[in-house]
Amino acid sequence: MSKIAFDGRHLTGEGVERLSRKLGDLGDIFSDKGAHAALPQGRLVYEVESVLPVKEGTEGGLFVGMTYIHPGKVGREYFMTKGHFHTIRNRAEVYIGIEGEGMLILMSEDRSRVWAEKMRPGSIHYIPGHTAHRTANTGNRILSFGAVWPADAGHDYATISENGFSKILVDMDGVPVLIDKP
Ligand code: M6P
Ligand code: ZN
């Protein structure tokens, strides 16, 4: 019997690590700085639960996680994850939509291409290597998805926090649209 399970709301079992990110932790990712500053900094944006069966950095190992993004917006931009490249750039990842509606936003390593895939319950997304990835909740309830990634992939957040993605996902009359970063 597996020692970890998803009970429909959370990962349960031994060794589940949890982290949460609040608006105050995410000042550098949203483009409308005024709208960000006006919101309560303690508001929860997303939570991540992960299981690391092997030591971080183990070649050939896999990690598994669940991410839960709350509904909300900062200005016209949807609540979203920080986003990252993998430190070892060629490492890929798989996301599986579980609940709610969202968009997986992807960007090529040279920043010239940004595209998005719709996430919904049951959608499966292959994130190739050399591709930055972040997810946005475009609905009005929680967006949750599962992820599986190589144990040696690593998270490069610095490249994204310095330059962001070259396009942002905004609400245009109720429709999520990618536009050039203002
Ligand atoms: C997925 C995986 C995790 C990641 C999480 C949140 O579960 O890709 O590795 O940590 O999403 O994304 P971020 O780390 O960019 O905040
Ligand atoms: Zn990743």
Image: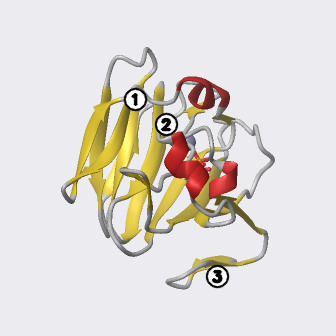
Decide: is 47 above or below 112.
below
Amino acid at pointer 1: Met
Asked if disc 1 and disc 3 are in contact, CB closer than 8 Å, the reply is: no
Q: Nearer the viewer, residue 125 or 2?
A: 125
Tell me how far mark 1 sits from mark 2, CA to CA: 13 Å
| Rendering quarter of residue 126 | top left
User: Count of labels shown?
Assistant: 3
Earlier sequence position, callout 1 versus callout 3: 3
Given this view, does label 1 or label 2 mark the residue nearer the observer?
1
Would you name the residue on which mark 1 appears? 107
Label 1 to label 3: alpha-carbon separation = 39 Å
Q: Nearer the viewer, residue 86 or 113?
A: 113
**What is the secondary structure assignment of the residue under circle 3?**
loop
User: Tag 2 or tag 3, which sits nearer the N-term?
Assistant: 3
The amino acid type found where label 3 is placed reads Met
Specify few, some or many for label 2: CA neighbours under 10 Å numbering under 14, 14-19, or 20 or more: some
Q: Residues within 10 Å of mark 1 (few under 14, many from 20)?
A: many
Q: Gap between marks 3 and 2, in whole Å?
A: 28 Å
At 64% across and 34% down in the image, what residue appears?
157
Mark 3 vs mark 2: give the one in front: 2
Q: Residue at x 48, y 52 (%)?
A: 80
Going from the N terminus, do you reach mark 1 or mark 2 first? 2
Q: Are marks 1 and 2 in contact (CB under 8 Å)?
A: no
Residue type indicated by callout 2: Ala
Residue matched to label 2 = 92
* Rendered position, 1 above or below 62: below
Percent coordinates x, y for residue 163 in the rendering: 54, 23
Image quadrant in which the N terminus is located: bottom right
Residue hosting label 3? 1
